[in-house]
Amino acid sequence: MTEFNHHPKDLLAFDRISVAQPFWRGFETAKNQVGIDDNVFLHAGPAFTTIDEICQPIVNSAAVGAVFEGLAKNLDDAIDMVRSGEIILKPAQDFNVVTPLAAVVTPKMPLHYVYDGNHGNQFCLTPINGGTGPAIRLGQKSDEAVEHLRWINGPVLDFMVSGLGEGVELIPIASSGLRHGDDCHGRTIAATKCLFDELASRVRGGVVSSEISEFFGKSPSMFLNLWMAATKTMMLAAEGVTGSSMITAMGGNGVRMGLQIAGLPGQWFTEMAAPPNGEIQEQLSDDRRLGAIGDSAVVEGLGLGAMQISGAPEQVKVFKNVLPDDFEARSEALKIGAHYDFTEAAPKIGIPLRSSLNFGAGPIVALGIIDKAGELGRIGGGIYDPPLSIFASAMDALDRSYEPGPIL
């Protein structure tokens, strides 16, 4: 393939991304920070077109969230509230929030507050990762999921608050993780350990309960949600650059996969979401696979995760049978350049649609595969390869909205 010269507007958007500095400063709620009503819950990916379209795992998670919030006495009543429209579901990224897999964000749930220390006015919120156990991201309707959510937002939250201090800069942790074999999405083992060690070192008296230590030790994805918020915060630095095709949002809701670009802020471009390609539990039929789901796709939309999988040998082993033959070529061709604050590892980031359309393929995304019936939770993991039609339709809309001036 011939060398592709990036469009000036995409380079401008990348310049803004490359100096963004995401910091985890504390915790906020969606009600306080973005003003959602008490009956509005936020989900991954683009909007559902009807109530009936909402996939069962998100209905289940919304029910868990309703009991957690105190809006419903039990899960059955909560399900009725979702199915009747009494609880309203909206896309998280439309409110500067990102959420993994089938997890919903409720109005009063404590959320990581991540902001851009350089630009100042950019921020993103995300729930605490549920780690191991019956986490809300798995989309199961159970009292155990409610209790686990309360525990995450009780003892785990208290530990994080006690060690946060003035805040944590997130790129150095991600950079260190990349150097030690993470990809910052499917594998965040090294970054999670770095995060825990940093927080534990700041706790007054140096005392960390054995329960919390054990939980972090068994939950290698605890850094992921923070990194999703950091990624989205960097993307938001590019939002509003007229004529830029830089990806600024990406995610699936189990029914549709969607994305947004810098030059058309707030506009989703979507296609029906096929399930990720990967192995699932034995004896399960393929129709139990839910379509691609989760806002964690923003990590690949920026250029990490599966788009940096060559630097994560253990992830390559996991997905070797389902990675497209050109995955290394895509990683090199689709991205623009390095971020200034990545020091231990300096991956290229920033993916404009123009790069994907020039190459003939978009960024691949590593995602968990969720049980469509909402009973078994995560049933496998795989690689999702978004249809090029999403990128083409967004690029067509951008071309129609933007009249480039003469190049001087």
Image (tube, rainbow, N blue to C red):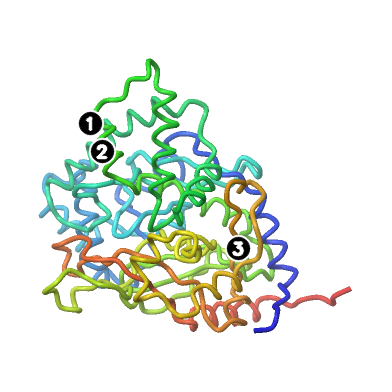
Residues at badges 1 and 3 in contact (C-beta under 8 Å)?
no
Distance Cα–Cα, label 2 vs label 1 = 6 Å
User: Which amino acid does the dot numbered 3 rest on?
Assistant: Gly
- Residue 158, placed above or below residue 230: above
The residue under the point 61% across, 44% down is 21
Q: How crowded is mark 3: few (under 14 residues within 10 Å), some or many (20 or more)?
A: many
Q: In which quarter of the image is residue 397?
A: bottom right
Report helix, strand or loop for mark 1.
helix
Sequence-earlier tag: 1 or 3 = 1
- Residue 258, placed above or below residue 101: below
Give the residue pinned by disc 2. 215
Give the foreground label among 3 and 2.
2
In this view, the residue in front, 369 or 10, is: 369
* Left or right of residue 30: residue 8: right
Give the residue pinned by disc 3. 350
Q: How crowded is mark 1: few (under 14 residues within 10 Å), some or many (20 or more)?
A: few
